[in-house]
Image: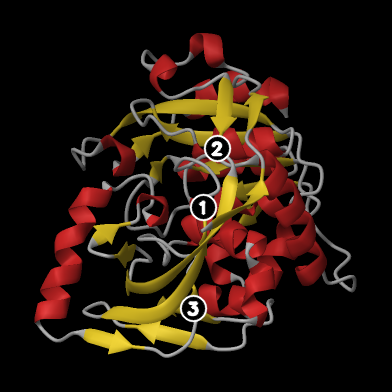
Amino acid sequence: MARELYPAMKVERRLPLNYDTMAPGKESFIRPFESFEPINLYELENVYISHQGVVLKSGRVIPESVYGMFEPRRQWSGFYKKILRGKRRVVRKPVLVVHHHFYDNYYHWLCEIMPRLFVAREVLQETSLLMPARLPQFVSDFLSLLPVKEIVSVADDEVVKAPKVYFPSHIARPLAYNEAVMTEFSEWLGAKLDDSSVTRSPKKLFISRKNARYRVTHNEEKIQEYLESKGFELARPEELTIRGQMNLFKNARIIAGSHGAGFANLIFARDCRLLIDIIHKEHPQDCFFNLANVYHTQYYYFQCEGTGKLAFKNNDDVIADPLAFQERVGPLL
């Protein structure tokens, strides 16, 4: 059984400011138009649920429960291996499921999973929330904002058998966002987290990935030095609580930095006019371009050469050219 929560919609995207001069291949991932399927709340009885939030009923994986980066048919064998090994946990109560495979990543949690929990929040009154057993602190902090009655934990090597499950649709294809949902969600989240006693919130932020394990920007200190001369302040979101991140980003007018989860905090910015993404020129990533469009923020891809440290371009370190950055980005600041 499914109940529609949000209707289908179609939106037009504003292209990146430097679209005409971007590296070849941009047409493969920059979508000027985006269509969204309706968002439904599903209710199914007598099911199995994996620790990744996938639902199995009557021997069939329910496609709507599977995150779009994965194929439903490939999820089937994992259930039966665990069931045959006796790794089945039985619960006697209805559960709500909202997470997917990347629940422990800040970006995926904030931009994809929390919005699912937001649209299904009314069901929290009559269900227990099913979550993986190992939760990062930021996940627990976000969950504390909602009236979660009980959390049912499922270990990585378990499946849960439940008499009833509720789960909402994924709000969009991976790395995209239903604008109606995201607008409502960010307003709700901002109201939950805002601390009116915090009066100092920078208007220009530079997000560093200096301490990251991958996707590091070589020459970042030169970029940072230049941006600080233009009034930017350094931000390391991973060192802050979720409330601290909200209060840091809420008044940002320009956000720049190396491509990474820190850009998810655009959700908190009330009136950001520009997002500058330092990224590998062969990294076909549209997640923050799409997010910027939700909040009417202009987007700029500062595309860089990779170092070749990793063959997978999406995670390779990049080499930023400080002079090119000043020449191309400077006029926008």
User: x and y percent of residue 330 in the render?
Assistant: 66, 25
Residue 109 vs residue 280, the one in the foreground? 109
Mark 2 Cα shell of 10 Å, populated few (<14), some (14-19), many (≥20) = some
Q: Secondary structure at mark 1?
A: loop
List the residue tagged with mark 3.
95
Q: Earlier in the sequence, mark 3 or mark 2?
A: 2
User: x and y percent of residue 90 in the render?
Assistant: 32, 88
Mark 1 Cα shell of 10 Å, populated few (<14), some (14-19), many (≥20) = many
Residue at x-position 10% and y-position 79%: 84
Q: In the rendered view, would you say 118 is above or below 39?
A: below
Q: Inspect this view and state whether residue 133 appears.
A: no
Q: In the rendered view, would you say 150 is above or below 245?
A: below
Mark 3 Cα shell of 10 Å, populated few (<14), some (14-19), many (≥20) = many
Residue at x-position 11% and y-position 72%: 81
- In which quarter of the view is residue 201 placed? bottom right
Name the disc covering residue 169, or none. 1
Residue type of the residue flagged with mark 1:
Ser
Residue 190 vs residue 258, the one in the foreground? 190
List the residue tagged with mark 2.
37
The C terminus sits in image quarter: top right
Residue type of the residue flagged with mark 3:
Val
The figure's colour scheme reads: secondary structure
User: x and y percent of residue 143 in the render?
Assistant: 60, 77
Residue type of the residue flagged with mark 2:
Glu
- In which quarter of the view is residue 162 placed? bottom left
Instruction: Tell me whether circle 2 and circle 1 mark residues in contact (CB < 8 Å).
Output: yes
Q: Secondary structure at mark 2?
A: loop
* Structural distance between the alpha carbons of marks 3 and 1: 15 Å
